[in-house]
Image (cartoon, coloured by chain):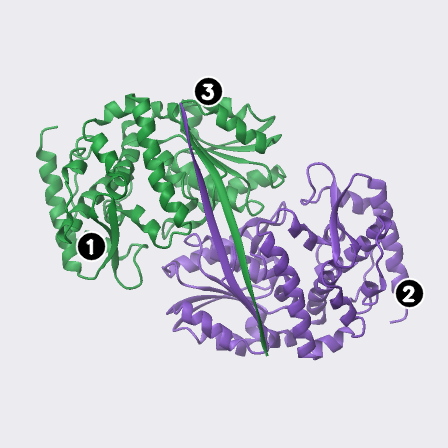
Chain colours: A purple, B green
Amino acid sequence: MLDKQQVRTQQSDEYIIAVGEDPSSEIQKVVAVYPGPKAFFFVDSNVMKLQAKLVDQITALYEEPLVYKVPAGEASKSVEQWSEMVSFCLSHHPHRNVPVFAIGGGVTGDLAGFVASTVLRGLPLIHIPTTLLAIVDSSIGGKTGINHEAGKNLVGSFYQPKAVIAPLKALQTLSDQEFICGFGEILKYGAIADPDILTILSTKDLSELRENVSLLGSIVQRSIKVKTDVVIRDTQESNLRMILNYGHTFAHAIEKQMGYGKISHGQAVYIGMIAAGILSKELGATIKEELIEQHFGSMMISDIEIDITPDQLLNAMQSDKKRSSTGLRFVVLKQYGRPYVEQIDDTALIEQVWSSTLTRIEELKMQPV
Amino acid sequence: MLDKQQVRTQQSDEYIIAVGEDPSSEIQKVVAVYPGPKAFFFVDSNVMKLQAKLVDQITALYEEPLVYKVPAGEASKSVEQWSEMVSFCLSHHPHRNVPVFAIGGGVTGDLAGFVASTVLRGLPLIHIPTTLLAIVDSSIGGKTGINHEAGKNLVGSFYQPKAVIAPLKALQTLSDQEFICGFGEILKYGAIADPDILTILSTKDLSELRENVSLLGSIVQRSIKVKTDVVIRDTQESNLRMILNYGHTFAHAIEKQMGYGKISHGQAVYIGMIAAGILSKELGATIKEELIEQHFGSMMISDIEIDITPDQLLNAMQSDKKRSSTGLRFVVLKQYGRPYVEQIDDTALIEQVWSSTLTRIEELKMQPV
């Protein structure tokens, strides 16, 4: 005897992503849905200092704001920090409708997102990303996570926010380094799905983008549209979502091999895109590399010494978590806007691509800015 | 300027719940979908001992079974235990298709489920519940969780399994105490949604149910059907799912006030149903209490001394996590099979229900078995 029943559960999440100079009106709508009196605010320690006014403006909307300062930096994405924040929440005996606001960059968003997803099996999460990278990337798509000694982001959940509200004015206090991290991802969106982004940026340099809030807003919106179009169709990161990893398989190898901290994620992704472009051409693509390469100067890579060999980079790739069980898979382009995924078993080809990439970077370093 | 985009994500999960004496054929289908070679097996330490053959039979289906013994008992549902199991998984560098089998009762299922939901943001989870309670309750519905010093199950996630496979032969080694825990929930399903369960059981005593595997199988299937019908329609525990808490608001107060360990969850739920029945009648229900009360002897409550006052129980309720922000809400019946949710602000009424319940229990204790 074996009796069976089939169960089908369905879940749909809808949320607003709002980008603008002043986010107050949108935040007030959130308050109307989750009126408190309690609300949790996990705020990056730098944001707390540099954007005190913005933080005050948001927390003041609740009668009992429960503010927790998240130490800035990747080290905060730990089990211990997560556990402490969970205890912070539970010590205030929340019911299931108490919202969690994550105010900061990717670290705060990933960490507070994981906290929100696990306290009482899920509190409503609102992202207020304050870095360019968090706005166009980490706050969208429902990934939360912390690090583990075995690797980055290995512990976490898929958990959709109730709203993402991006205050562009917060970007004014970003360092150049932080700004280019987001810029690398924006170029990636251009390459995989919206070549107009590359065209628009081909006549602008980075400082122009920073100062022109209306231009920045429209580029940010285009970028968000690319990411949401992909994640809507692939919530659980099975296949389509892989195209968002354009350049990333290469980038992770660089980060791993150079050691985190010596090169930023944005810079590594940028180099990864140069490599992915070279691989794409090897496989027959027709793309104008200059649309990516012309931003070499802006990406501040010239002063970084990359003293690693193609062989080391290949090895680093082979131990990367995103490998399939059989061979290395890459996102490559037919042309800008037409990505596909290719499994490559010919490791000599990859080593050769690394070699060409390292040579190309040295050439670009020589060019006048 | 404030630009907005609306994002809608959808996720549907489908899984099989299979109940039978021998689960091998169904487990083999799981293996076909997740062929390994690696698979994680989190096995309750008692099950490892008492059901060694069953465990061997399942783990032998994989080339590289990675077996972890979960210490039996509620204390295992801790952050530390979760963290250790997460590290165990990550130390084997799994890819995202390595399945997690949870073999045991509610503790193992809740804990291993939370591990599965958080490693690499989700590994495929297969429940092999080995207690009656886990089969009819905790393995179904996608709740995972661990405890916190602030209360039980306060940390966790909603995460659907890929399959639930219940080997009825495992129930043979259950203690009477473990068996009645599940029996209490079965009576609850009868009360809230399938009165035929109560009618069938009105002519059977508990030992008959234990020995008659075909009867047990059909009662278990009816119970699972009640739970799945509810959770399908309400994955995230908003409203409908509340009816599954019939008796539980009362039960939690008893458990909290008496101290966990002095009374089992099943016994507490049973007393909670007597209380909920009394409240239902106060609100105008027409129900035959004897369909629940006739099992008083089977539930082994006669020897438990319940030396708490209605006043203490009311206080315990008011600090329960399932309170709404305004008043106490209860699942009550119009008649068997017709539950509804009622908010009751009149605390004197609740105190009176507690008083009647305690009196009724003393009366039932006096009756001949």
Which label sits in the foreground, 2 or 3?
Answer: 3
What's the amino acid at mark 3? Lys
What's the amino acid at mark 1? Leu
Q: Mark 2 lies on which chain?
A: A
Q: Residues within 10 Å of mark 3 (few under 14, many from 20)?
A: few
- Describe residue B270's horizontal placement relative to residue A190 as left or right: left
Residue B343 vs B85, above or below: the answer is below
Mark 1 or mark 3, earlier in chain: 3
Q: Which mark is residue A358?
A: none
Report the residue marked by disc 3: B53
Quarter of the image containing the N terminus of chain A? top left
What's the amino acid at mark 2? Met
- Describe residue B218's horizontal placement relative to residue A14 as left or right: left
The one of B161 and A313 positioned closer to us in this rendering: B161
- Describe residue A338's horizontal placement relative to residue B297 as left or right: right
The one of B95 and A75 positioned closer to us in this rendering: B95
Q: Distance between the residues labelled 1 and 2?
A: 78 Å
Give the residue drawn at x 76%, y 50%: A257
Residue B275 vs A38, above or below: the answer is above
Report the residue marked by disc 2: A366
Marks 1 and 3 belong to one chain: yes
Q: Is residue B325 visible?
A: yes
Q: How far apart are marks 1 and 3 (CA)?
A: 47 Å
- Displayed quadrant of residue A369: bottom right
Q: Residues within 10 Å of mark 1 (few under 14, many from 20)?
A: many
The one of B36 and B195 positioned closer to us in this rendering: B195
Residue B281 spot, x, y in % from top left: 14, 49
- Describe residue B272's horizontal placement relative to residue B128 as left or right: left
Q: Is residue B309 visible?
A: no
Report the residue marked by disc 1: B314
Residue B307 spot, x, y in % from top left: 15, 44
